[in-house]
Amino acid sequence: MHRRQRGVNTGLLLLFAQIYQFGLNNIPPVTLAALGLNIFLFLNPAKPLLYVCISVHEGYYHRDWQRLLLSPFHHADDWHLYFNMVSLLWKGQKLENRLGSVLFAAIIAVFSQLVGVVYVILELVLAEFMDDPSYKMQCAVGFSGVLFALKVLNNHYHPGGSSNVFGFQVANRYACWVELVAIHLLSPGTSFVGHLAGILVGLLYTQGPLKLILTTAVSFITGGPATRQTSYNNSGYARYPDYQQQQYDTRGSYDMYTGGLSEDEQLNRAIRESLNERGQRRTHQDMDWSSPGQLSLEEIRRRRLNRF
């Protein structure tokens, strides 16, 4: 383990505050486990980021496929972790209650690996099509590729309505595509191809064969239907609709912290605050891009680290 250097991690503190206000007992088990794994690996990375990020060069040519396993669960900084985990908290609670914990666990496990595979394929195609080998060096980490896939599923299972995407009302069916472009423009350090890979994986589930494969596998393992709706009350026990008990509403306690803002509105505000903070923290230690010919391979690889 490579323990992260201690410091003031504002994003991490805000994330803990979000989890506390939401209530641990109100977070479904698989969502909670995924949150815990991402936070643990942020505080205790398995390896330095340059040795866990996924790219064509490292993953495909060097056959370092361990990066597929590690890259989704590592984050570049505390704000990167905060954005992704708040989104996971919201999406995971809705989808796990809708699909059941076993199927949702299978989705998280498969999506986290499949997004990396699609990312490598897209970068390889871009490198060949654009005749630009730099695409093969683009190295990315983070969970947001999986989150874009989960957003496609969420819109599939909860159709209709609209989302506020950076001040514009967008129909939910198009929201992931608008966010794909908007986040890339407002935060250039993010991986456009990584997010696109997530959307494509989500479509493989909703429009392709992936849903049938996963539901069949889960049904075979559990000996019952793959999809089973559950909800979690304040005592933390799982229950099923058959019991005719009043569903516990977690939205009230959540709104106490968020001020009633939707997930997208929270994300928009957090991105603006993060960009402002990063702008204030820039120093003379930032890399100079004016002389790329003088950079070592290690510096080039470090510079091309993108965020899912």
Image: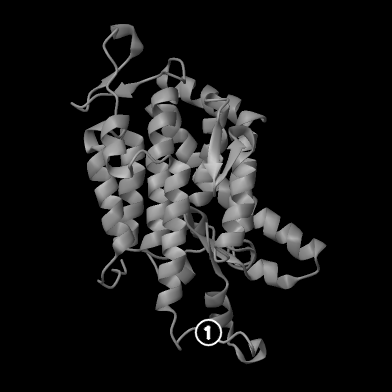
Whether residue 302 sits left or right of residue 256 in the image: it is right
The quarter of the image holding the N terminus is bottom left
Q: Residue at x 61, y 67 (%)?
A: 138
Q: Position of residue 230 (x, y in %)?
A: 35, 21
Q: Is residue 223 visible?
A: yes
Task: Please tell me whether mark 1 sits on a helix, a strand or a loop.
Answer: loop
Q: Which residue is mark 1?
A: 287
Return the x and y of residue 246 as percentages of the image width and height: 27, 13
| Residue at (28, 31) in percent of width and height | 252
Q: Is residue 75 visible?
A: no
Of residues 272 and 198, the one nearer the viewer is 272
Q: Residue at x 58, y 34 (%)?
A: 172
Placement of 50 over or under 243, stated as above or below: below
Q: Is residue 1 left or right of residue 48?
A: left
Q: How is the image coloured?
A: one colour
Badge 1: residue crowd in 10 Å (few <14, some 14–19, many ≥20): few
Q: In the figure, residue 240 lies in which quadrant?
A: top left
Point out residue 189 in the picture as x, y percentages from the top left corner.
55, 66
Give whichever of 167, 27 is nearer the camera.
Answer: 167
Q: Residue at x 63, y 46 (%)?
A: 178
Left/right placement of residue 22 relative to residue 55 reads: left
Q: How many marks?
A: 1
Q: Amino acid at mark 1?
A: Met
Residue 117, position as x, y percentages in the image: 61, 51
Asked where in the image residue 103 lies, by quadrant, the reply is top left
| Vertical relation: 276 (above or below) 201 | below
Residue 238 higher or lower than 78, as above or below: above
298 or 304: nearer the viewer: 304
Give the vertical position of 197 relative to 231 (above or below). below
